[in-house]
Image (cartoon, grey):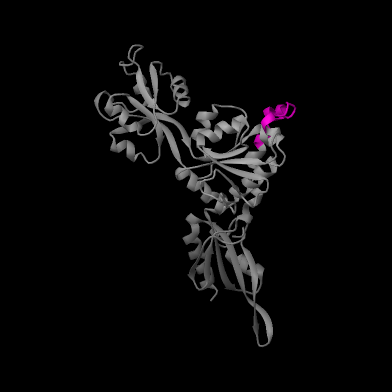
Amino acid sequence: MSLLQPYFQQCASAAFSISFPSHSFYVSVSKRTFISCCSSQSQTALVDSPVDSKIAERDEIRLGLPSKGRMAADTLDLLKDCQLSVKQVNPRQYVAQIPQLSNLEVWFQRPKDIVRKLLSGDLDLGIVGLDTVSEYGQGNEDLIIVHDALDYGDCRLSLAIPKYGIFENINSLRELAEMPQWTVEKPLRVATGFTYLGPKFMKEHGLKHVIFSTADGALEAAPAMGIADAILDLVSSGTTLRENNLKEIEGGVVLESQAVLVASRKALIQRKGALDTTHEILERFEAHLRALGQFTVTANMRGGSAEEVAERVLTQPSLAGLQGPTVCPVFCKRDGKVTADYYAIVICVPKKALYKSVQQLRAVIRDEL
């Protein structure tokens, strides 16, 4: 699919067509986050540092993608929507290519291994959840968040406690911390897979008597089994917590997370082509994400000139579009002569204003009939 091809076409009436605007319409807005990262003082210091051996020993740029689960599927969908389809010869292989990006290899890895391999120099770019970057990156300055909102994988890392027993009337982190039950001999027991973010959060919020037990899988069962007093886990809708008689508490959210594009600072500086490739990926992501909530509305209107038609359209503020309407003559042949009695109006409007804009545009057209 071409970048200029609309994603969606729907005829509202004979006079109207509605579609997503093309990606290329938004390409020029893509450098914001990335430029701020590249101009930092810490990166400048790295330019003069010795070249990392792992970066020097290969020429190809490596992009790490999640290998399994919903995050993996959604990541491939995003890349496909941005005209960056991943080509995998054998689904059992862990390496693939994106034909539109030369000299780039795609490596399918577990999310936590993507972060670890970014730090070790075995990968240059990766797409993972912000929770994974924060837990396994542990604030390492070599990791740069190139795009912090890819609009999928939304969840939060949150503390949850039972709804019953001694926790029945506990509804905030402050109340939990003030419970007299927690002592050196009997600390609050928290089951979690986040052994870096968990202790860091508790220390920052003044909870002194806390111990953590590492666990994977169904953490929601831990309090009922008596092996933990609370859990710290990723929450999306909260349904699983409610079904297991657990509740989130005020102030207990450690981190709001979604999918992010992350890069190795050293790779961006030292690997040939890494900066340009990252810039192109970022442009495509920004174009796609900016276009998601926008529709193009097209209508034909009779008029004496493009200026006259534009003036009538602009009497309605919601029809101004992003930078004003596009007005073009519609040519037809009448009595052997080419004339332009009608003009095509094209405006770009947000989804929430779509119906109102269509109604106002129809009203403007009716007034001239």
In-image side of 125 versus 129 (left or right) = right
Q: How many marks?
A: 0
Image height of 289 relative to 301, above or below: above
Would you identify the image quadrant in which residue 25 lies? Answer: bottom right
The magenta segment: 36-54
Image height of 150 relative to 142, above or below: below
Residue at the extreme left of the image, as rendered: 165
Q: Residue 270 in the image: state x and y as whole percent.
A: 71, 34
User: Is residue 317 shown to the viewer in this render?
Assistant: no
Question: What's the residue at 70%, 28% (across, down)?
Answer: 46
Task: State the residue in front, 225 or 183.
Answer: 225
Predominant SS of the magenta segment? helix
Question: What's the residue at 66%, 41% (across, down)?
Answer: 61
Q: Residue 52 in the image: state x and y as whole percent.
A: 69, 29
Whether the magenta-drawn stretch holds residue 46 is answered as: yes
User: Is residue 122 shown to the viewer in this render?
Assistant: yes
Image height of 194 relative to 65, above or below: above
Question: What's the residue at 36%, 11% (across, down)?
Answer: 184
Q: Residue 308 in the image: state x and y as whole percent.
A: 64, 69
In-image side of 23 versus 205 (left or right) = right
Would you identify the image quadrant in which residue 346 lies? Answer: bottom right
Would you identify the image quadrant in which residue 222 lies? Answer: top left
